[in-house]
C-alpha cells in the first residue's frame, strides 16, 4: 500500500513515540547490533542516534529519538525534555518514513494520540509499531491503535516478531536509491599516518588478505596504493577504494628524493580522498608529526576519523574514554573526527571502523534542510548575541548550504568583518549539535547582504539546540 504523500529524497526512517515504549530496543533490533542504551528508566535516550541499517538487502538510515514527553511548548519547562523534543522534530524533518512506536500492553495513551496528531499535521508517511507483542495473544490488542489513523503492525523488538511485515511495508514507502551506485562512485578513503603505525596491516585486516605488503621496517610503502574493496552483493553492495600511503616523516628528516616525492603523493591522496583515516599508534600516543598530519587533513577539508591501532598493547593501562579525552586535548583541530580503537593484529574493532567510515562518508555529502539551517542559526544567535566588533554587531539574515566535501554554509549578514573566530566556532558547534556531522568539516562563509532582512521563523518544527557541557 502506497500513501499519497510527497516523497522526500532521503532513505531515512525515524522512530518516534512517548518514553519507555521500546524505541531503542527496536532500533537495536533493526540494526542487528546494540548501539542505543536500553533501560526501563524514563528519558535514557535524549539525543538522536542515527546509523546505516540494512534489511532484506536494502540499505537506509535509521534514526532513534528520545521519548516525547510533552508536545505543547507552553507546558514544557524542562530544558532537557525540551531539547529531546527538538531532536524529535529534527528527525521528523529528515525522515521519509516515521515509525510511531507504542506499547501494546499499556494500550492507547493520550501521548500516542498527541504524537499522531503532530505527524498528521506534518503530512508524514507513518506506520505504527505496536511493540511488546511478545506473544500472539497480544496481537488482538493492536487493533486499538488503528484509532491513530495509520497502518498498525503488532511487533516485538525483544523477539523480532512481526518485524518482517512492518519493514516490508516501510521499505516500500522509501524513495528508490540514487541512480549513481557506489560501484560508479566508490567511497575513497586515504589511510595516512607516521611510519610503522600499522596502516598496511590495518588495510590487510579489513580485506582479509595480504593485498598490501606489511613489514616492520619503516618506509616499506613508498607509493600510494589504491585497493578496491566491496561489502555486500549486487545493487546493495557498498564499494570503496582504500588508499594505502607512505608513512609521513617530518620533511626535515627526509633525505632521499624518492621519500620526498612519496610525501607529495600522500598529500595528494589526502586532497583526493572523500574520507581520511588517520592511523595512530596506541602505545606511543600522538606525536608532533601526528598533529601536523591532522592539520593537513583539516587544511584540505576532508572527512576524517582517527584510528587508534595496536589497542591490544595499551588496553588495561587506560580506558578508551580516558585515551580519547587525552587525544582530543592533543589534537583539538580534529575534534569533529570520531575515534575508533582497533587492533590490526587481532581484528578488534574492524567492523566499527567500517561503520565509522560509512557514517563519515555520508556526513561529508549531506544536504541540510534550508529551513532547519535557518532555525538553528537564528535560535543560537538569539540565545547568545555576537560580540560587538569596532562598534558593530553581526546580524544574520539568511543561511543556505552551498557545497559538500567539505560542507560549506553561507551566511548573509550585515557586516562580515563583525564576526569573530570564537563566535564562528560557536555557530559551527551549534550546527554539529543539530545535525550530527560526525567527521565532516564545516566551513562558514559570511557574505554582506545590506538589503536583506532577518528571515521569519517558520511556524512549527523546532530546531535542536546544543546542551551546555
Image (cartoon, rainbow, N blue to C red):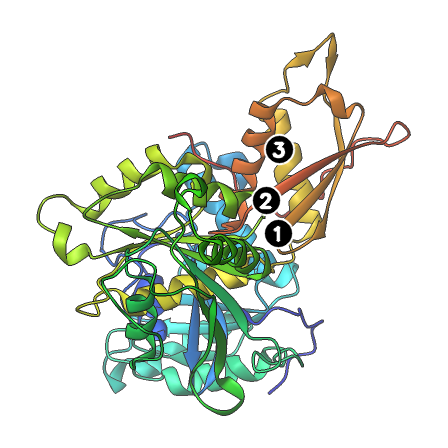
List the residue tagged with mark 1.
406
Q: In the figure, residue 211 lies in which quadrant?
A: bottom left
Q: What residue do we see at 54% from left, 54% from top?
A: 264
Q: Nearer the viewer, residue 65 or 332?
A: 332
Extreme-left residue of the structure: 316
Q: Report helix, strand or loop for mark 3.
A: helix
Q: What residue do we see at 61% from left, 29% from top?
A: 424
Depicted 331 relative to depicted 92: above or below: above
Q: For the residue carrying disc 3, how many other residues have a C-alpha within 10 Å: few (<14), some (14-19), or many (20+)?
A: some
Q: Where is the C terminus found, in terms of image quarters?
A: top left
Q: Is residue 32 visible?
A: no
Extreme-top residue of the structure: 391
| Nearer-N-terminus badge (1/2) | 1
Q: Nearer the viewer, residue 459 or 297?
A: 297
Q: Where is the N terminus found, in terms of image quarters?
A: bottom right
Q: In the figure, residue 231 lies in which quadrant?
A: bottom left
Q: Report helix, strand or loop for mark 1.
A: loop
Amino acid at each position: 500500500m502506497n500513501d499519497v504523500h510527497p516523497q522526500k529524497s532521503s532513505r531515512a526512517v525515524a522512530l518516534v513515540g512517548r518514553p519507555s515504549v521500546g524505541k531503542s530496543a527496536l532500533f537495536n533490533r533493526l540494526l542487528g547490533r546494540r548501539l542505543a542504551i536500553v533501560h526501563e528508566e524514563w528519558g535514557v535516550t535524549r539525543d538522536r542516534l542515527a546509523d546505516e541499517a540494512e534489511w532484506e538487502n536494502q540499505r537506509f538510515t535509521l534514526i532513534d529519538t528520545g521519548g516525547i514527553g510533552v508536545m505543547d511548548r507552553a507546558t514544557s519547562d524542562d530544558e532537557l525534555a525540551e531539547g529531546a523534543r527538538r531532536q524529535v522534530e529534527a528527525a521528523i524533518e529528515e525522515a521519509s518514513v516515521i515509525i510511531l512506536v507504542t506499547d501494546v500492553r499499556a494500550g492507547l495513551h493520550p501521548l500516542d494520540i498527541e504524537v499522531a496528531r503532530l505527524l498528521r499535521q506534518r503530512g508524514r508517511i507513518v506506520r505504527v509499531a505496536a511493540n511488546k507483542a511478545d506473544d500472539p495473544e497480544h496481537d488482538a490488542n493492536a487493533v486499538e491503535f488503528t484509532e491513530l489513523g495509520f497502518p498498525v503492525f503488532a511487533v516485538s523488538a525483544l523477539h523480532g516478531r512481526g518485524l518482517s511485515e512492518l519493514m516490508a511495508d516501510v521499505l516500500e514507502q522509501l524513495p528508490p536509491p540514487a541512480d549513481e551506485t557506489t560501484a560508479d562512485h566508490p567511497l575513497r578513503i586515504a589511510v595516512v599516518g607516521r611510519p610503522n603505525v600499522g596502516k598496511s596491516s590495518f588495510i590487510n585486516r579489513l580485506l582479509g588478505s595480504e593485498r598490501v605488503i606489511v613489514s616492520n621496517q619503516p618506509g616499506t610503502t613508498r607509493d600510494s596504493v589504491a585497493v578496491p574493496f566491496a561489502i555486500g552483493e549486487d545493487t546493495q553492495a557498498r564499494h570503496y577504494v582504500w588508499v594505502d600511503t607512505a608513512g609521513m616523516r617530518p620533511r626535515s628528516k627526509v633525505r632521499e628524493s624518492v621519500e620526498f616525492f612519496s610525501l607529495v603523493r600522500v598529500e595528494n591522496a589526502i586532497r583526493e580522498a572523500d574520507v581520511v583515516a588517520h592511523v595512530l599508534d596506541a602505545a606511543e600516543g600522538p606525536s608532533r608529526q601526528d598533529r601536523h598530519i591532522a592539520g593537513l587533513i583539516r587544511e584540505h577539508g576532508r572527512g576524517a576519523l582517527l584510528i587508534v591501532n595496536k589497542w591490544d598493547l595499551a588496553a588495561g593501562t587506560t580506558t578508551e574514554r580516558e585515551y580519547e579525552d587525552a587525544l582530543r586535548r592533543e589534537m583539538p583541530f580534529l575534534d569533529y573526527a570520531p575515534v575508533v580503537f582497533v587492533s590490526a593484529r587481532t581484528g578488534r574493532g574492524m567492523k566499527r571502523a567500517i561503520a565509522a567510515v560509512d557514517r563519515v562518508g555520508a556526513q561529508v555529502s549531506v544536504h541540510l534542510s534550508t529551513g532547519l539551517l535557518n532555525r538553528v542559526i537564528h535560535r543560537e544567535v538569539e540565545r547568545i548575541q555576537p560580540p560587538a566588533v569596532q562598534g558593530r554587531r553581526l546580524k544574520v539574515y539568511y543561511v543556505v548550504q552551498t557545497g559538500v566535501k567539505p560542507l560549506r554554509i553561507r551566511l548573509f549578514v550585515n557586516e562580515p568583518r563583525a564576526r569573530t573566530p570564537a563566535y564562528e566556532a560557536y555557530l559551527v558547534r551549534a550546527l554539529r549539535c543539530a545535525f550530527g556531522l560526525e567527521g565532516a568539516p564545516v566551513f562558514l562563509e559570511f557574505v554582506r547582504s545590506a538589503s536583506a532582512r532577518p528571515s521569519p521563523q517558520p511556524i512549527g518544527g523546532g530546531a535542536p539546540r546544543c546542551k551546555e557541557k
